[in-house]
Amino acid sequence: MSKLYTFLKYFFITFWTVFVVAPFLWAVSTSFKDFQSVNSKVTYIPWLDFEPTLEGWRVLIKSPAKGGVDIVEPYFNSIFVTCTASLISIVLGTLAAYALSRFTFKAGFVRNNDITFFFISQRIMPPIVLSIPFFIFLSTIGLLDSLLGLVVVYIVLLMPIAVWIMVDFFNRVPKELDETALIDGCNPYQAFYKVVLPNSIPGLIVAGMFCIIFGWIDFFFAFILTFTEVQLLPVKVVALNSSITPWWSLSASALVSVAPLIIVAFIVERYLSKGNLSGALK
Amino acid sequence: MNLIGEKISYKPDEQFHLNDVSFNFKKGNLYTILGRTLSGKTTLLKTIAGLLNPDQGSISFEEKDFIKIPVWERNVAMVYQQFINYPHLNVYENITFPLEQRKLSPEQIKKDVDEALKTVGLVGFENRKIQELSGGQQQRVALARSLAKKAKILLLDEPLVNLDYKLREQLREEFKRIFSEGLSQDTILIYSTTDPQEVMELNGEVIVLDEGKVLQKGPAKEIFENPSNLKVAEISNDPPMNVLKGSKNLKNVNFENISLEIPNHFKNLEDKDYNFGIRASEIKLDENGEEFEIELAEISGSETLLHLKRGNSKIIALIEEVMNFKIHEKVKINFNANKFYAFGEDEKLVSSPYGGTNG
């Protein structure tokens, strides 16, 4: 019985790992292929099946004038927009979450939970519903097709995530901790940044991770709200797929765009595996 | 120069959390607040600390209006029933935290912290993380932080309730020592608890609180000997005092078809119906006694608690040895009539074996 269980366990783990990792390996190998090795027959092993070439990667940094696609600028655009929007979302979202967790708000029938739900409801709506208002809004204030406009929109998208995660986190930090800080001579601001914030680092990391992931992978708004001036990485990668699909540079750019998330995952994984994300406070 | 509260009421929802509570706490004294859970003990302590503002009433300390002073300037210290420490700081930093907030000199801080660590017996634990400590040790850190502050008002909110039995006993002993030697003469110590035994051992002035109302104030001995009404008698005894509805005539005390010879202190009572109170420890097993049916028998430590029934009356007897009983078995017990209390129909104390009455 237990042997069967062990067998099945490892079988499914192996199956799933292959299922997840295989496309990556395929993309890695494809990125080093040329037109011939992609289109003639199925090839697997470099040097044996096909002659590896760096052409797929070189195209990415060449300017369009020289027949390249130049994803360097969109890459830095994406980093800038994602990081700025995430940072602002985390700062504002954490403050909002702390207030929602600790103070009681009353305005007509609106209570704390309603306000929290209002934040989360921004994510419940299908993005397509938001696209037209955002478009009109940005064109009115003249921020269409600009990095700043994208940052503004991404804050709207990311802050609910930060608020949601941090409200839940703060609710699990005992109120008595803040009270003890007050009794020990901190005013409410000192209590927040001297006691509550240092104990919220695990929550901040998780919230930050989710903001970065959701900001980085967004294609829809990046596509709708930009034209020629500014381009973000996801749009640029998809745009590579023209009449003839350059599978090699498409694979290379896909790998490059996934890389930051993998790095984030590895950093966060250390915190996750330490087990101090939820158990930091008893 | 006292901490004086007058007619404090706090009613955040439909129910009173504090209802017309007044007190006058003098420096250098120990006060215990006794009450069951949700009786308003924590609310009262938080009100004194400044974490809650009462809807009505006033609090003054050293002739100043306390309510106008924010928490962080009140110089009080509080230990919670949950072990609240700063998880991101180690033991030493936890204790220095309030002192650094008050910008004391490093030498002064070191001296105060070392002293506090010594008092609570945590010398050598300075660099430990809070999470590495046991519950009892965490509570000691919280206590050390409160002591090191040398606050003029020290609030302890059921500090032992979340500890296991052994540790509770041990820390309770230590508390008595710490309170007698570790506190200066101008500290007001306020200690809340649900445990009557703690109240008796700490032996301070007691306030009995129930549903936000003060039921009785007085020295621990007085509360124990002359509980002013049935509620106090219930709250201040563990197990709660047994109540038997019955009547008294010239020669006898009668309840549930049992007739006992009248004790001396009942001689002058009017002949009518009473609620008689008798502590669980004043009931003994006796071959010649009255027959009761066992509903439940629990062994607690070296004692056995018998839940007994006869007619409409349910009582608890405390037997000071470990014995095995069968449920629904009949046992014979004897009441120590000299320790009977009489409470009127209005539940007020009428006669006590220790001579107190409530008029």
Image: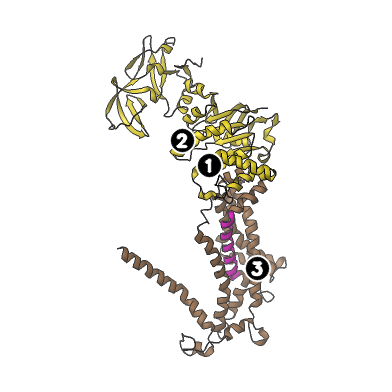
Chain colours: A brown, B yellow
Q: Chain of mark 3?
A: A
How many residues crowd mark 3 within 10 Å: few (<14), some (14–19), many (20+)? many
On the picture, is B333 further left or further right than B274?
left
- Viewer-nearest of labels 1 and 3? 1
Secondary-structure class at tag 2: helix
- Of B185 and A164, the residue lying toward us: B185
Above or below: residue B245 compared with residue B36? above
Q: Is residue B263 above or below residue B151?
A: above
Q: Residue at x 64, y 41 (%)?
A: B111
> A106 or B207, which is in the foreground?
B207
Q: Which residue is mark 3?
A: A81
Task: Return the residue nearer the eye: A236 or A227.
Answer: A236
Rendered image quadrant of residue B338: top left
- Disc 1 and disc 2 in contact, CB within 8 angstroms: no
Q: Which quadrant is the N terminus of chain A positioned in?
A: bottom left
Tell me the crowding category of disc 1: few under 14, some 14 to 19, or many 20 or more residues within 10 angstroms, Cα based.
many
Distance from disc 1 to disc 3, alpha carbons, whole Å, reads: 47 Å
Residue B266 at x, y percent in the picture: 42, 12
In the rendered image, the vertical position of residue B251 relative to residue A162, given as above or below: above
